[in-house]
Image (tube, rainbow, N blue to C red):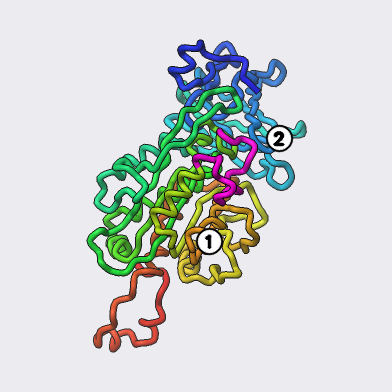
Amino acid sequence: MRETHFLSAIAFAACSSFFLTQNVDAQIQLDASFDHASLKASQSFVSSVSGDIMLRGRTNYYGNDWRWLYFKTSNIVNQNPQFWISDDFAGGSSRLTNHKMIYSYDQENWHYFDNNGLDYEGGYKFSNNTNFTQNDVYVAYSFPYSYGKASSHVASLVGNPYVKPTKSANSNLVIGQSPGGVDDLGRVVTPKNLFGYQITDTNSTKPKKKIALTSGLHANEVLGNHTLEGMINMLVSDDPRMKKLRQHADFYVYPMLNPDGRYAGNNRTTVENVDEDPNRLWHPALYQDHKDIKTTADAMIADTDADIDYFIDFHSTIPTGTQTDFGYIPYYKDNHNDPFWLSLKDREPQIAALNSTGTNWYTTNFAESFLDAEFDMTFETMFSLNRSQDYYTDLGESFALAFFDTIVPLPEPTSFMLLSVGLVPLLTSRRKRD
């Protein structure tokens, strides 16, 4: 369905086909015309009865359900409005019962709204106890992670002594471009960069484990990207444990698998194929007509020589029965007893494991079948747990440290060490080393 408010043809092209800011009141304005934003602004309004700002989410996947919300409201200083949106959020147990929306004045520092909850009219309301203190306020479902943020983070790694292009990437760590397309609002989304890079110690001649890391496949699953970024920042740091890890492991990173969907503010899918789940297409017979998936899949095969030890795809999820972050892990390969997972559990005891079964051509099925991955996992960070953004940074660091625990050999025991601490404790202590 095409939005009813558009820029002129010239401005339309110049502004990447964003739609007009919508007046919802004589004072308050709503804007969803930026990278990663999502709102039907032209159908949002101030209720003449309640005074609430009535929001309309986009329904570009799963029928009438919405899965992402991000917009800017202006001329709101010294005001304290209540926001309302329909609670069509995949239905059933995944509704917004325990969720909290967030707001920011600068798109960097985010705060939870004070009041969040369902009403008796099939809606969800959120507000603060005090007035906003600035004119522009950004509102989101969860901590945004835009295509621009991904691009900036990759750019910051160019020239890092521990980062180099993969075989498929150019000097800017770009492996190709997405197809672009026209989104559900009728806006043209131009092709975006697909990234791939390797983290390693190029001077090390020691045998190395190979680990492939991905995220950003589902357009709204931002917490996975924050977790991966925390891991990457740790891996490329000067931490002495990471120095040792880079001598024993190569990391192949593909941080934004669906840049078009993320940029367009999609709920889940790519722009090119809005009615298909992109995590059901990771087989050559299925992704030939899906340029973004094919580009990354071909790159991973070439970059890793189709042979890796570990594969982790970072996602996010609506609330599930676990009520915590968890990994989908194939028990039939005994991956839930892998030393890496056990070490991660030691460092993050709140996480859980769920058995991953069947072949639906997820990224993990691709890793098993075409990259010969010995360990594979889809790691799900759960929305509605209302944690701080720092939690996901720290969680990512724990992933890096768990690989250190697992891959870096223990030092050879000396006579002094054996006399001081005893042989058995030294040789059996593997996990959570600092």
Marker count (numbered): 2
Q: Is residue 351 visible?
A: yes
Q: Amino acid at mark 2?
A: Gly
Judge left or right: residue 99 versus residue 74. right
Residue 364: x, y in percent?
54, 57
Q: Nearer the viewer, residue 215 or 96?
A: 215
Rounded to the nearest angstrom, the CA distance separating label 2 from label 1 is 32 Å
Q: Is residue 223 left or right of residue 45?
A: left
Decide which of tag 2 and tag 1 comes sooner along the chain: 2
Do the residues bearing badges 2 and 1 touch, measured as CB atoms within 8 Å?
no
Q: Residue 33, image x and y in percent? A: 50, 23
Q: Which residues are magenta?
A: 272-292
For mark 1, does the 10 Å Cα neighbourhood hold few (<14), some (14 to 19), or many (20 or more) residues?
Answer: many
**Mark 2: which secondary structure?**
loop
Q: Secondary structure at mark 1?
A: helix
Q: Is residue 149 magenta?
A: no
Q: Position of residue 55 (x, y in %)?
A: 64, 26
Q: Which residue occupies 35% across, 87% down?
A: 423
If the image is split into quadrants, where does the N terminus sit? top right
Type of amino acid under label 1: Glu
- Residue 108 visible to the viewer: no
| Mark 2 lies on residue | 63
- Categorize mark 2 by other alpha carbons within 10 Å: few (<14), some (14-19), many (20+): few
Where is residue 5 shown, x and y percent of the image? Answer: 58, 14
Q: Which mark is residue 368?
A: 1
For image coordinates 47% across by 29% down, the residue present is 35
Which of the pair 339/432 is nearer the observer? 339
